[in-house]
Amino acid sequence: MRSDVKIDERIQETSPTLLKQTWFKIIADTIKTGIIKSNIMAMLAGLTLAIYTNHISLFENLPNMIVAIIGSAFVIGAAGAFNNLYDRDIDSIMERTKMRPTVTGAIQPKFTLLLGIIMALLGLAFLYFASSLAALFGFLGLFLYVVPYTMWSKRRTIYNTEIGSLSGAMPPLIGWTAISSDLMNPALYGLFAIMLFWQMPHFYAIAIRKHDDYKAAKVPMLPVVKGFNRTYLQTNLYLIALIVSSFLFQPISITIMIVATLLSIVWLIISVIGYKKMTPEKWAKIMFIYSLNHITILFVTIILFSVIGTFFQK
């Protein structure tokens, strides 16, 4: 029996539920739901800290919180769709991305483009209902990720990570401005700086672990172009900047400042000691794992502190 006949039979036997799950997975992979979830946590850190700092009622701002979450999810998902659409040529070369729906053809380019546009418009509309500033920062995050990062710097310069990090630092600002219009608060700059500087050690670690992929795709990541030693030194500089940035939380919360500082100091110690004793690949793996724990612990601390602190303010 011909193989295509067997495939047709399997398709006919496939339940509608399974097909629906498969379609949901295709959409989820296209809009990068994992990145949406992590960025929503960053957005919530900014939102809850704004509520605590400005002595605002948590329940009275529930509608703003809901539309900000929905809007942020749509905007971040749109950015993921546009990125997958534009990068499908280099994604087809890299092992970790070659099975993305935009590469395999599971989703068509026109549909991906339409999906991205609809999600972007809906997301910005929802954010505008929260506040015009939240919509502005949402637009900036989307624009910076798609144009300066994806369409320009990613394939042209070793500073693509730094340029991309500007977009990655927007979610806490979206959350903050959904609640407060105060753009001069040091806590706001603390959130922005933490997200900005955190991304370089995180993505440098990925670039070392996927060095051969990026080299094959001719993406000029720092370790590919300048080598591991340069990446290690630059990583440590950003970790020092991360430690210094932690002190921006001091006027708002000594607790948050201490947690942020200790997490970053430990990260720097792991970097220095690990690089001396490990291969670059093993060092990068540990640095990557710690980066995820670092940002998760910090933002969960900020969210819990802000929510609990808001109740005690009443």
Image: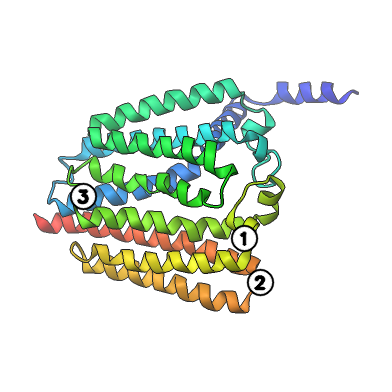
Up/down of 220 relative to 9, above or below? below
Query: Contact (CB < 8 A) between labels 1 and 3?
Result: no
- First along the sequence among labels 1 and 2: 1
Q: Position of residue 191 (x, y in %)?
A: 31, 55
Residue under the point 52% across and 69% down = 233
Q: Which residue is mark 3?
A: 50
Pointer 3 local density, CA inside 10 Å: few below 14, some 14–19, many at least 20: many
Horizontal placement of 220 versus 68: left or right? right
First along the sequence among labels 1 and 3: 3
Q: Position of residue 222 (x, y in %)?
A: 58, 57
Under circle 1, the secondary element is: helix
Along the line of sight, which residue is nearer the eye, 225 or 258? 225
- Asked whether residue 303 appears in the rendered view, the answer is no
> Which tag is nearer the camera, tag 1 or tag 2?
1
User: Where residue 236 sits in the image (x, y, percent)?
Assistant: 48, 69
* Disc 3 secondary structure class: helix
Horizontal and vertical percent position of residue 262: 36, 72
Q: Compared to 149, does 116 lie above or below?
A: above
Q: Amino acid at mark 1?
A: Lys
Q: Quadrant of the C terminus?
A: bottom left
Which residue position holds label 1? Answer: 226
Residue mark closest to the camera, 1 vs 3 = 1
Q: For this rendering, which residue is in front, 30 or 91?
A: 91
Q: Is tag 3's residue or tag 2's residue first in the polypeptide sequence? A: 3
Does residue 18 lie above or below 261 as drawn? above
Q: How is the image coloured?
A: rainbow
